Amino acid sequence: MNKHIAPKITLLGAGPGDPELLTLKGVKALQTADVVLYDALTNEALLAHAPEAAIKVYVGKRSGEHSHSQGAINQLMMDYALNYGHVVRLKGGDPFVFGRGYEELDFAASYAVPVTVIPGISSSIGVPALQQIPVTHRGLSESFWVITGTTTNGQISDDIYQAANSNATVVILMGLKKLAQIVSVFKAAGKAQLPAAVVQNGSTENEKLVVATVEQLQAKVEEAQIEAPALLIFGEVVSLHPSFKNIIKQYAAIS
Ligand code: SAH
């Protein structure tokens, strides 16, 4: 290791996509970066905050792509820190919400390299908020669950079955491919008429939104050709969205 190098790592949450949704602390961290390692779901506009001379490396892992394994990213992060100094590890949303941030922290700690975590706005809360869908609301929702649709064994999470039977707002990440199965879980829980929404590319210019009852959700998602990255929201709070109010009016007019 070069004696003049002080290795350190900042795990930085980039927010859901809009580059202005980065925290001020995040901007300051990028300004002092020697190296930035960034993911597929982070906006490249954020790299402009880093010095021109900083090394910028894409280590994206979109679903289906296996450009870098987690082990390779850990090793790369460490090599850069030991050789260049301050590595900013830029991750989509919040680093600790399905971001494998702790694995990177743990790896750095095993080399005694100091790590700072700067939280980001997680898509799980930020994307519904941008649609003016509150994850909690007095009288409608006392809690919210953020669940993965795809667990390490490729199955939907068992938690979805429990959540579907609760009154919680249920936000599902990485669940688009499992939509049919997820919808059937909610139907089996007697929630066919529950309001639901799917948001693709929230907070970006490619944003798409589908709002429907659980029963209608899959057809509408197919019609709108929704693609990843997208998140699913199930819960009475979705009824607060203006387009859901219109759907209810349309049904009322028909019947
Ligand atoms: N750490 C991230 C989540 C990583 S898992 C966070 O806190 O937001 C990746 C999943 O997050 C995607 O498959 C998708 O379900 C969701 N996601 C991330 N960004 C999104 C966005 N802008 N719009 C909709 N869903 C998004």
Image (tube, grey):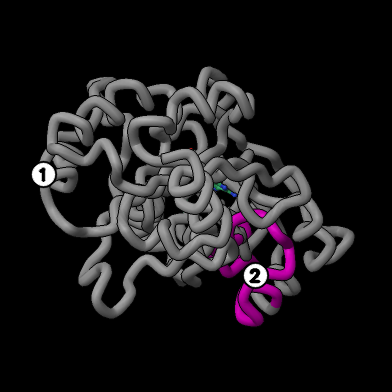
- Disc 1: which residue: 162
Q: Amino acid at mark 2?
A: Leu
* The residue stretch that appears in magenta: 1-27
Magenta stretch: residue 20 in it? yes
Q: Is mark 2 within 8 Å of ligand 1?
A: no
Tell me which numbered mark, 2 or 1, is placed earlier along the sequence: 2
Given residues 98 and 90, the one toward you in this image is 98
Looking at the image, which residue is at 10% across and 44% down? 162
**Residue 11 visible, this angle:** no
**Residue 88 visible, this angle:** yes
Q: Quadrant of the N terminus?
A: bottom right
Residue 66 screen position, x and y as percent: 53, 20
Magenta stretch: residue 71 in it? no
Q: For the image shown, how many numbered marks are present on the structure?
A: 2
- Disc 2: which residue: 22
Mark 1 burial class by Cα count in 10 Å: few <14, some 14-19, many 20+: few
Looking at the image, which residue is at 70% across and 74% down? 27
> Which element type, helix, strand or loop, lies under badge 2?
loop
Q: Amino acid at mark 1?
A: Gln
Q: Alpha carbon of mark 2 to alpha carbon of mark 1: how far?
A: 33 Å
